Image (tube, grey):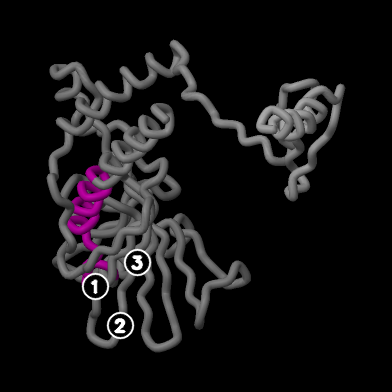
């Protein structure tokens, strides 16, 4: 009896296994079990295949780049002069946004805003050429073009300024100076003006006015502007005095250049660190 029951149970199993081929579909539309003989093999739909990326091997060029970046970051960090950038220059508060720098202050009922961008602002420092020869490295200095907006109510007078080469600015081969004794402005040949003389296009000027524009509300390209190169000499000198009274002086421009030099250097180091992180992954 027991052997007969065992044969009845075993018979269907033998018949099922001995079938030449069959397809068993799961409830999932993407997964099929195909049985060929006694072997069951799961087949996944291409839509559900999960590709696990393997860790890429770094090329020789990438390894060399990473080695250089590591050394460069250390060297550039050692050259930094400021561990922490100041938050103010004179009476101006500083706000940083990536490569953009904004400085603001109040002057009576006016708002004075200085804006600039440190991108492409670095060149060799002519005053440090002798020092660079002895040290064997070029001294770099940031001298970005900057805008000075003096806003009163809804009206703004805006100056575009740039740093001068060694404090010398020319206009049509002449310079102007003021005769302190007579209280008058005189036009003198360019070579007649000596360092330290008072007046327009002074050799001691750290920056010059490139353009002047006045507008209401927002600035538009249609607003009329005048080049600093064609301004009347007396008017130019008075506008420079106007800027100086609002804190934009030669001393301010020098400190601004020092700040931008250090800030641009920190931005450069951050770029190197970001590049290293990009290549290493």
Query: What is the x, y in percent for residue 230?
Result: 48, 59
Name above or below for residue 147 compared with residue 75: below
- Ranked by sequence position, the earlier of labels 2 and 1 is 2
Look at the image and tell me in which quarter the N terminus lies: top right
Mark 1 — residue?
246
Query: What is the x, y in percent for residue 236?
Result: 36, 64
Name above or below for residue 25 compared with residue 249: above
Task: State how far apart marks 2 and 1 are (Cα).
Answer: 9 Å
Task: State how far apart marks 2 and 3 are (Cα).
Answer: 24 Å
Q: Residues within 10 Å of mark 2 (few under 14, many from 20)?
A: some
Between 178 and 107, which is closer to the camera in this rendering? 107
Between 21 and 66, which is closer to the camera in this rendering? 21
- Ranked by sequence position, the earlier of labels 1 and 3 is 3
Q: Residues within 10 Å of mark 1 (few under 14, many from 20)?
A: some
| Magenta highlight range | 243-262
**In the image: residue 12, left or right of residue 73:** right
Based on the picture, tell me whether residue 166 belongs to the magenta stretch. no
The dot on residue 234 is: 3
Magenta stretch: dominant SS?
helix
Mark 2 — residue?
110
Q: Do the numbered discs 2 and 1 sit on residues whose CB atoms are within 8 Å? A: yes
Residue furthest toward the front?
Answer: 1
């Amino acid at each position: 009896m027991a052997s007969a029951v065992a044969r009845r149970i075993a018979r269907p199993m033998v018949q099922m296994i001995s079938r030449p081929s069959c397809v068993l579909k799961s409830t999932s539309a993407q997964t099929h079990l195909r049985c060929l003989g006694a072997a069951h093999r799961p087949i996944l739909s291409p839509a559900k295949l999960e590709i696990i990326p393997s860790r890429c091997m770094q090329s020789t060029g990438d390894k060399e780049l990473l080695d250089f970046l590591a050394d460069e970051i250390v060297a550039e960090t050692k050259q930094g002069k400021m561990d922490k950038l100041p938050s103010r220059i004179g009476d101006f508060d500083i706000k940083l946004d990536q490569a953009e720098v904004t400085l603001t202050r109040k002057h009576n009922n006016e708002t004075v805003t200085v804006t600039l961008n440190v991108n492409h602002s670095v060149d060799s420092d002519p005053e440090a050429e002798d020092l660079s020869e002895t040290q064997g490295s070029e001294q770099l200095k940031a001298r970005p073009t900057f805008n000075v907006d003096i806003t009163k109510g809804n009206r703004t007078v805006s100056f575009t300024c740039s740093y001068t080469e060694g404090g010398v600015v020319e206009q049509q081969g002449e310079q102007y100076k003021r005769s302190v004794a007579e209280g008058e402005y005189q036009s003198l040949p360019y070579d007649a003006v000596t360092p330290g003389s008072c007046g327009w296009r002074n050799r001691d000027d750290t920056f010059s006015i490139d353009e002047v524009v006045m507008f209401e509300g927002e600035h538009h390209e249609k607003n009329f502007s005048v080049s600093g190169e064609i301004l009347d000499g007396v008017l130019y000198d008075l506008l420079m005095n106007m800027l100086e009274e609002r804190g934009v002086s030669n001393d301010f421009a020098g400190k601004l250049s020092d700040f931008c030099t250090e800030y641009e250097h920190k931005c450069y180091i951050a770029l190197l660190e970001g590049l290293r992180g990009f290549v290493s992954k």
